[in-house]
Amino acid sequence: MDALYQNQKLVELYDAVNRSREDFDFYIAGLPEPPATLLDIGCGTGTFALELAHRGYDVTAVDPAAQMVALAVRKDTGRSVKWFTGSVTDLDIDLRVSAAVMTGHAFQCLLEDTQISALFEAVGQRLSQDGSFWFETRNRAAKPWLRWTPDHAAPPVDLGAGRTVEVIHRVLSVNDDCVTFEEHYNFNDDSGTLTSQSTLRFLDLDGIEKLAAKNGLVLSETFGNWKREPLMRDSPEIIVRLKKAV
Ligand SMILES: C[S@@+](CC[C@H](N)C(=O)[O-])C[C@H]1O[C@@H](n2cnc3c(N)ncnc32)[C@H](O)[C@@H]1O
């Protein structure tokens, strides 16, 4: 598990560094009307799960990173979401959801085919017959990691009270469809620098479809960006909606 999701200081920075979220409105537009039962997989600090609960959905949210879930629970002062630390396979087999979502490129944390198969199987078991599983991966063909350099760093993020943090990326290796990189969090005060190393997988659509088919799911829709434009070869995102095979 990445330090990003385990180190208490980095976990507490997650929401500040990830403030701008075009993906939330995109996914909300694809969901059934509330009240419906939803599953947020890799829920992280819980911002999307809390937004869904606020809109009247019955939300279960799960993530393997205990520190991320603990922060989500602290944010949920109204106890509006059912939170779990672990994976979908740990959830009650009788849970039935109209839709499952996996946002924030959490799908790319799954590096092995076996992990993706286990995810697809577990989601399929818990989806209602006409339910949907929505998630996205950055598009490998667009090679986004070429811009993960200090030159392309975003402006420092305001943390309040005069504190800022600048996040700088450095790619360490690109092997097949996996990219390993460091993130350096440079603070403007005496906190110094925190560093996290991550590996993300860039599985292409063909690979997603094949693993889905092996686990009883079929491709229902794809998009190439958060404006709902069609998936093209160089689209930034591969946004996928899977359904149960009939
Ligand atoms: C970039 S965060 C996204 C969090 C949240 N979904 C969002 O949109 O802000 C990636 C999340 O994926 C989680 N994760 C890592 N491995 C996972 C796995 N095998 N299954 C599900 N989630 C995983 C991490 O713990 C982390 O919370």
Image (tube, rainbow, N blue to C red):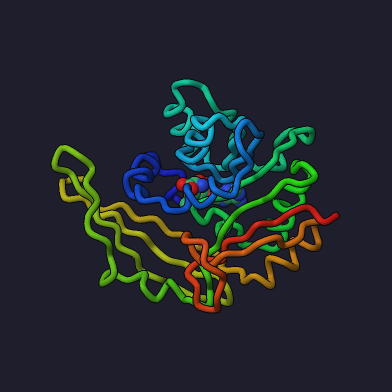
Percent of width and height locating residue 216: 81, 56
Q: Which of the 4 image quarters holds residue 218? A: bottom right
Identity of the residue drawn at 43% across and 59% down: 197
**Tally of numbered discs:** 0
The extreme top residue here reads 78
Whether residue 102 can be seen here: yes
Identity of the residue drawn at 16% across and 50% down: 188
Identity of the residue drawn at 72% across and 62% down: 219
Percent of width and height locating residue 233: 55, 78
Whether residue 122 can be seen here: no
Above or below residue 74? Residue 104 is: below
Residue 28 or 134: which is nearer the viewer?
Answer: 28
Whether residue 98 sits left or right of residue 148 in the image: it is right
Whether residue 210 sits left or right of residue 204 in the image: it is right
Residue 70 or 144: which is nearer the viewer?
Answer: 144
The extreme right residue here reads 246
Identity of the residue drawn at 19% across and 39% down: 160
Above or below residue 190? Residue 218 is: below
Residue 119 or 186: which is nearer the viewer?
Answer: 119
Whether residue 136 sits left or right of residue 130 in the image: it is left
Q: Quadrant of the C terminus?
A: bottom right
Whether residue 176 sits left or right of residue 127 in the image: it is left
Percent of width and height locating residue 125: 79, 44
Percent of width and height locating residue 161: 15, 37
